[in-house]
Image (cartoon, rainbow, N blue to C red):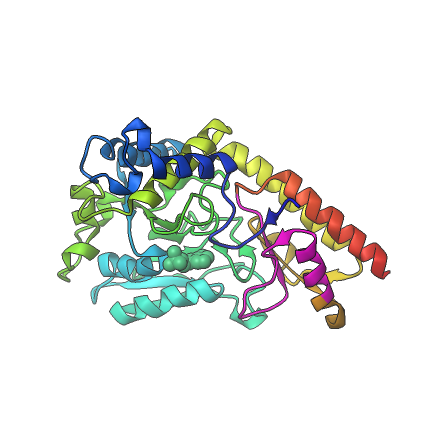
Amino acid sequence: MKLHNFNAGPSALPVEVIEQAAQALHNFNDSGLSLLEIGHRTSLFVPVIEEARHLVRELMQLDADHEVLLLHGGATLQFLQVPMNLLDSTNVASYTETGTWSQKAIKEAALLGEVSIAGSSADDRFTSIPSSLQIDPRSRYLHITTNETIAGTQWHRLPYDCTCSLVADMSSDILSRSLDFNRFDLIYAGAQKNMGAAGVTLVVVNKNCLGKLTRTIPTFLDYRSHIKEGSMLNTPPVFAVYVLLLTLRWLKAKGGVAAMEKNNLEKANLLYDTLEQSPLFSLPVKKEDRSLMNAVFLVKDAALEKEFAATAKAEGMIGIEGHRSVGGFRVSLYNAISLASVQALVDFINAFARKKS
Ligand SMILES: Cc1ncc(COP(=O)(O)O)c(C=O)c1O
């Protein structure tokens, strides 16, 4: 039976990426060695990390002020590293509170300086994106989580007009839609949803924002150290960087970010329309704030929930349970998930609904 993988992360990767990565584990570029056995500063690996960084620059159409870094520690380390580099006692950081992930970012920033909440959707249990923001005029930056993976919300109107630096956690929608990436002074994202395997974190930073603090930043946490060393301050996560490169090559060959956006819209519309039309399901997120990456929904009759989950699994639909903290269901629709898989899911949903009506 074909499995349709809707896991929220780590998540589905293109088959060809997995095949090439497997090959590289046995014999990397006909070197006779595994990718895992070669030095990161050798002529075998250096071109890998350089091409990966170059492809990010190309796909995001970044200008010369923006540096591309491939780091360790996941987006979670960025919750700390961002304020470590941008916030001190002379300024303020504004954050939007839109769900679990932004709350984690806020918690870390508050350890390092004054945080102002510019907008929150806590009162409607994170089922929307704040429609207006109050940004403290002393703000050094405004932080947003462009896609809240658990809540299933996404910023569709970006606050480009904020009068401070715009900083974004794009872990779950990076490279899934065309944005004006140069309008952000800092973007970060773990690779394991839209860009490859867990273990490598992308940071895009406008270098003009750095070096303005009174704080002494430990070397490893200072973005400038990583810029200086070309993301090789220490041993990079070589396998994850290679899978990132393969995924970026795949993305480019498929037509780049604009082509991803078109597919992602088609997949999300197909799924949301199906769920909306069925009397069996409800969609908690405000329509205009629904995520194109993580569709969250509920089975109205709680007694049917277990059966829906079990039948989905038996039909090869993997990873559709909601996050353990919220329950319900969540279907992730990242770049590598095909329209055919979404169609298979929709066919299953329709068949289940017919049986129960
Ligand atoms: C929006 C968002 N931010 C941050 C994280 C944490 O990422 P990591 O596990 O790479 O630290 C996640 C993980 O799912 C996420 O979805």
The residue depicted at 37 percent of the width and 67 percent of the height is 106
Q: Give the range drawn in magenta.
A: 307-334
Which of 329 and 145 lies nearest the eye of the viewer? 329
Q: Looking at the rendering, in which quadrant would you find the C terminus?
A: bottom right
Q: Position of residue 69 (x, y in %)?
A: 28, 44
Relative vertical location of residue 145 with respect to residue 21 in this rendering, above or below: below
The residue depicted at 65 percent of the width and 52 percent of the height is 317
Residue 115 in view (yes/no): yes
Which of 320 and 19 lies nearest the eye of the viewer? 19
Relative vertical location of residue 135 with respect to residue 204 in this rendering, above or below: below
Q: Position of residue 48 (x, y in %)?
A: 29, 34
Question: In the rendered structure, does residue 144 fall within the stretch colored magenta?
Answer: no
The residue depicted at 66 percent of the width and 46 percent of the height is 1
Q: Quick one: which residue is furthest to the right in this view?
A: 357
Which of 79 and 24 lies nearest the eye of the viewer? 24
Q: Where is residue 198 in the image (x, y as percent from the top left)?
A: 39, 51
**In the image, 234: left or right of 127?**
left
Relative vertical location of residue 142 with respect to residue 228 in this rendering, above or below: below
Question: In the rendered structure, does residue 324 fall within the stretch colored magenta?
Answer: yes
| Quadrant observed for ligand 1 in the rendered image | bottom left
Instruction: Locate residue 232: give its quadrant.
Output: top left
Residue 56 in view (yes/no): no
**In the image, 73: left or right of 16?**
left
Q: Position of residue 125 (x, y in %)?
A: 57, 70
Instruction: Locate residue 43: give its quadrant.
Output: top left
Total numbered badges shown on the rendered structure: 0
**In the image, 315: left or right of 79?**
right
